[in-house]
């Protein structure tokens, strides 16, 4: 092998995919260059690889070749880092007089600004986030064009202006060509004005400058370009030169040397074929496929050679599959079975099952010493699912795609600060900020958390009532002590005043910094200042907390860059600032530290050229792997072709080559999911072809068995899953608390619940649980009803002094009550319009009654204790209205929803009014003598047709209803005094007003899991 570089040029080799590319390359170069007469030949060599991860792997491979001796490593570079001005290249480099590359963020902001300006001129959307999204697509287009150009010339866009007319394209593409004057005119003019170039242009020019330098003065040292498929023209130009250097060599990854001539020709014209890029590279070098030899000294295991043949045959271009039966016959069943040995296909039922299986495979590999394993997938979602599952075993895994900064504590804190500063009194945003573990505001974190919890339950749950922090402070000051759920911190009670001080500190902070507005640098400075002030503790400055660690350092660099380049973007409207900054931060990712050395989760690009004992290829479904070609919002496929831009399908061909490389490893696990995102998934085209080939040779049943490779993965998953058998009819909760824990006091409204839904009574009265209203949620039916009740209370004042305009007075009362309930101006106008029939009805009914001498008493509290064999049973009530008049006492109950019918009242399923009447009959209302009410009425209000609905059925009377109510209460007392009596959830579904699984108590009882099974029996 010492004569490796003595062979004729062009010198082009390949390494089969089943062999460890980097180990073989390192060993071959060490053997070829380790000579006594040239002791520094290896260290003087330059090796160019496609990725930095591969570069690190090659450096380790060189060290493994000489574990006992010190080794001077060659100069290892990547294609993206190849720079003639690299001082490490010494005499191989050169000083270039070329413009530097523009900063990526600056480019993004300038392109977005140009797009916004063009959008305003064309009457298109000028939304900043839309402009940034379009800028990203435009940047991709510029990078593609940059790599297709040559020399110092820019890409030729001259055909763009006549593209639509010359090629008879749809007329709407004219808008795109007009829009792309940004690329052809505005963007080049800007770059020239600041003496900058696109990053892609700089990378291409760097490589071309290196080519020109080496062509003029060919280096005598060893130059190796390895692992690249040559998908870019400039890379192929570099290959063509290096292959002809005196000590040059090109090593291609996984060239199919056994493919038929017809298939090779077809691959040259099929963008989705795995050998397409390599065929272009060989043609550019100026050789034929048979001129490419396997790197000397490479020994490919026979079984893996068979695997390579099977995989390559499975990926044969569709146009070349007419003779598949004969080629399958030539391969032979025995060879196909041998080739598929060590390759296992698992088709999971769901994404969760797929991730669980992969996690178990990764974990199981660690049981064997020195074994390595990699999960390779283009799906960041699968990668993060598996990484999260690995943490169950306290294993931190290196995920090459990184972790979005928004998923880190620092990132989420900055997002909360950003969002909260735009609307400081918003309940959701305020709770998110105060609940974050980094929020201290100069106080002890425990103190802030305790205040935040009390503020949340006291004033933030339910409809939003305050629109500013000062209004929120006023709302907290007016909060009744009973609603402040105080907590203890370090033995001290957190009082309401502590909460007021906390909100005041927030208000003072915002007053000092101001809300987000204006330019991006101003916004970035405001957020940074706010974040530091909010994170500060009693003992530590906020800057020391916010900007520490990898996430903090990354965020600090981002904000510094935003302050430097932010003025390139026009000022943003306040309502769009949060979305814009959030979008700009979305690309920040954090790489974990301290990860397990034998497990990796990689994307296909990062995994290229790396070797592992076991490889898991996950997400083999259409749309995941391969991912569909990204749509170009500016140019159609024919337009790209006419302009000379690469086809979008090129990436699919490169993905196919990656798949072929990885699937040829010694131990491979292929996984897919039958469903993704709650929809059926289609198997990857490569997987389908592999299964079709195996089935054609072996039959479907035998092929399935061979691909399963004896893997009983379902049993393995069940072995680790909890052993639970779910029987729906036995899952119905039936709590039986001890008698002493069962409630003996009820409000009148709770008695109906006791009858209709005993389980709710158990939850609310025994467990003392209550469902919290949503944070700043919509106006609920209950809140609306309470506001209407509050408005009606003004009628009691009319007894002594009737208003001049009753309609106006009642309208004002409703308006005040609705505002206090949290209605904003828009919803208030709508609600008042809905209440107009109710106002007219109330005035029409109430005024004659007031003139007739009826005195209304509102919100009257009363109680009654019944002496039962089981002990005292206390009943409490608050009557909406008790009207005292010439004909006795009437009890009125206002209902904004549908009231119970008189039949339901008689059956005691609408027991509220009879219970109130029972209390009144026994003198339970303070200040009112014991008196049997003369009538009970429901007043149905709030809708289009308000009316009075009698609660007393024609076949009964108030005294009889009172007697039935008392008997019902005594029966309930006796029934639930029995320790064997369970509190069942809604035992009489047919009698419920509404059955819904959205009810929090239904969710607590897990009703959706057993109700349907129960009902079907």
Image: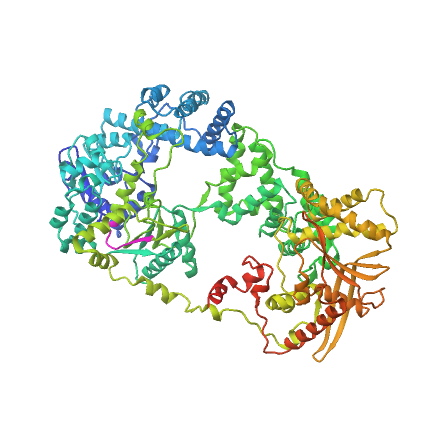
What is the tally of numbered marks visible in this picture? 0
Visible residue check, residue 461:
no
Viewer-closest of 413 and 114: 114
Q: Judge left or right: residue 323 versus residue 53.
A: left
Q: Which residues are magenta?
A: 663-672
Q: Is residue 196 magenta?
A: no
Visible residue check, residue 332:
yes
Residue drawn at the location 67% of the way across and 48% of the way down: 943
Viewer-closest of 236 and 581: 581
Q: Is residue 669 magenta?
A: yes
Q: Position of residue 911 (x, y in %)?
A: 69, 65
Q: How is the image coloured?
A: rainbow
Viewer-closest of 8 and 321: 321
In the displayed image of the protein, which residue is found farthest to the bottom?
Answer: 869
Q: Position of residue 398 (x, y in %)?
A: 39, 51
Q: Judge left or right: residue 473 versus residue 74.
A: right
Residue drawn at the location 31% of the way across and 35% of the way down: 79
Q: Position of residue 799 (x, y in %)?
A: 86, 52
| Image quadrant in which the N terminus is located | top left
Q: Position of residue 80 (x, y in %)?
A: 34, 35
- Asked where in the image residue 958 lies, by quadrant, the reply is bottom right
In the displayed image of the protein, which residue is found farthest to the front?
Answer: 955
């Amino acid at each position: 092998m010492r004569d490796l570089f003595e062979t004729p040029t062009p010198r082009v080799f390949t390494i089969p995919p089943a062999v460890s590319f980097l180990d073989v390359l390192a060993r071959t170069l060490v053997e070829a260059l380790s000579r006594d007469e040239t002791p520094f030949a290896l260290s003087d060599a330059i090796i160019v690889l496609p990725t930095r991860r591969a570069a690190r792997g090659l450096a380790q491979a060189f060290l493994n070749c000489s574990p006992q001796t010190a080794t001077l490593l060659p100069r290892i570079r990547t294609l993206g880092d190849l720079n003639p001005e690299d001082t490490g290249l010494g005499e191989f480099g050169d000083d270039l007089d070329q413009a530097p590359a523009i900063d990526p963020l600056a480019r993004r902001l300038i392109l977005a600004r140009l797009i916004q300006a063009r959008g305003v001129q064309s009457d298109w959307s000028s939304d900043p986030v839309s402009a940034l999204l379009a800028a990203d697509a435009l940047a991709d287009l510029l990078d593609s064009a940059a790599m297709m150009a040559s020399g110092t010339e820019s890409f030729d866009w001259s055909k763009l202006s006549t593209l639509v007319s010359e090629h008879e394209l749809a007329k709407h593409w004219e808008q795109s060509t007009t829009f792309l004057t940004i690329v052809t005119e505005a963007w080049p003019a800007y770059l020239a004005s600041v003496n900058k170039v696109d990053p892609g242009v700089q990378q291409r020019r760097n490589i071309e400058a290196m080519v020109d330098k080496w062509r003029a003065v060919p280096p005598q040292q060893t130059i190796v370009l390895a692992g690249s498929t040559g998908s870019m023209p400039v890379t192929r130009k570099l290959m063509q030169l290096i292959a002809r250097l005196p000590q040059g060599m090109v090593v291609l990854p996984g060239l199919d040397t056994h493919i038929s001539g017809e298939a090779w020709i077809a691959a040259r014209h099929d963008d989705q074929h795995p050998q397409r890029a390599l065929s272009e590279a060989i043609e550019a070098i100026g050789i034929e496929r048979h001129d490419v030899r396997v790197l000397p000294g490479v020994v490919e295991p026979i079984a893996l050679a068979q695997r390579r043949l099977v995989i390559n045959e499975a990926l044969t271009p569709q146009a070349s599959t007419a003779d598949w039966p004969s080629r399958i016959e030539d391969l032979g069943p025995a060879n196909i079975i041998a080739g598929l040995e060590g390759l296992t296909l698992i088709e999971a039922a769901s994404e969760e099952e797929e991730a669980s299986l992969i996690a178990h495979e990764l974990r199981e590999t660690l049981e064997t010493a020195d074994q390595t394993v990699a999960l390779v997938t283009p799906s960041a979602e699968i990668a993060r699912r598996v990484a999260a599952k690995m943490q169950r075993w306290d294993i931190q895994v290196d995920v090459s795609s990184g972790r979005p900064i928004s998923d880190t504590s620092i990132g989420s804190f900055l997002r909360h600060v950003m969002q909260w500063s735009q609307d400081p009194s918003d309940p959701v945003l305020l709770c998110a900020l105060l609940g974050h573990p980094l929020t201290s505001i100069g106080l002890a974190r425990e103190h802030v958390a305790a205040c935040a919890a009390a503020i949340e339950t006291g004033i933030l749950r339910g409809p939003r009532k305050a629109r500013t922090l000062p209004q929120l402070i006023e709302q907290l000051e007016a909060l009744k002590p009973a609603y402040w759920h105080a907590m203890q911190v370090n033995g001290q009670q957190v009082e309401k005043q502590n909460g007021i001080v906390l909100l005041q500190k927030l208000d003072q902070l915002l007053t000092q910094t101001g809300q987000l507005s204006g330019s991006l640098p101003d916004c970035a400075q405001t957020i940074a200042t706010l974040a530091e002030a909010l994170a500060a503790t009693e003992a530590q400055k906020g800057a020391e907390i916010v900007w520490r660690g990898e996430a903090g350092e990354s965020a600090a660099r981002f904000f510094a860059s935003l302050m430097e380049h932010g003025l390139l973007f026009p000022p943003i409207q306040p309502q769009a600032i949060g979305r814009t900054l959030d979008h700009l931060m979305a690309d920040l990712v954090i790489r974990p530290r301290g990860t397990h050395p034998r497990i990796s989760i990689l994307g296909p690009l990062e995994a290229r050229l790396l070797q592992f004992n076991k490889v898991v290829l996950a997400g083999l479904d259409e749309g995941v792997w391969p991912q569909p070609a990204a749509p170009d919002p500016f140019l159609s496929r024919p337009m790209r072709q006419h302009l000379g831009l690469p086809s979008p399908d090129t990436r699919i061909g490169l993905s196919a080559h990656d798949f072929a490389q990885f699937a040829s490893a010694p131990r491979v696990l292929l996984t897919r999911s039958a469903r993704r995102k709650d929809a059926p998934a289609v198997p990857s085209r490569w997987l389908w072809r592999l299964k079709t080939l195996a089935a054609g040779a072996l039959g479907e049943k035998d092929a399935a068995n061979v691909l399963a490779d004896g893997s009983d993965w379902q049993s393995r998953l069940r072995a680790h899953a909890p052993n639970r058998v779910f029987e729906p009819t036995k899952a119905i909760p039936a709590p039986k608390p001890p008698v002493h824990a069962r409630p003996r006091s009820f409000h009148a409204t709770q008695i109906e619940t006791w009858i209709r839904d005993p389980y709710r009574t158990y939850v609310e009265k025994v467990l003392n649980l209550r469902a919290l209203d949503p944070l700043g949620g919509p106006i609920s039916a209950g809140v609306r009803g309470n506001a209407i009740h509050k408005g009606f209370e003004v009628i009691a004042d009319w007894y002594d002094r009737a208003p001049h305009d009753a309609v106006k007075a009642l309208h004002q009362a409703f308006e005040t009550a609705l505002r206090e309930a949290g209605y904003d101006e828009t919803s208030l106008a709508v609600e008042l319009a809905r209440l107009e029939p109710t106002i007219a009805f109330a005035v029409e009914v109430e005024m004659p009654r007031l003139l007739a001498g009826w005195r209304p008493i509102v919100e009257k509290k009363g109680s009654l204790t019944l002496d039962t064999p089981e002990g005292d049973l206390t009943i409490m009530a608050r009557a909406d209205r008790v009207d005292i008049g010439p004909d006795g006492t009437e009890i009125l109950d206002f209902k904004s929803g549908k009231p119970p019918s008189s039949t339901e009242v008689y059956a005691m399923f609408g027991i509220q009014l009879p219970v109130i009447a029972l209390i009144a009959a026994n003198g339970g209302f303070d200040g009112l003598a014991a008196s049997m009410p003369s009538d009970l009425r429901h007043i149905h209000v709030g809708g289009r047709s308000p009316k009075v609905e009698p609660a007393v059925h024609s076949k009964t009377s108030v005294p009889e209803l009172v007697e039935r109510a008392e008997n019902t209460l005594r029966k309930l007392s006796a029934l639930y005094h029995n320790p064997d009596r369970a509190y069942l959830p809604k035992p009489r579904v047919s009698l419920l007003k509404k059955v819904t699984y959205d009810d929090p108590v239904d969710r607590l009882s897990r009703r959706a899991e057993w109700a349907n099974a129960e009902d079907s029996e």
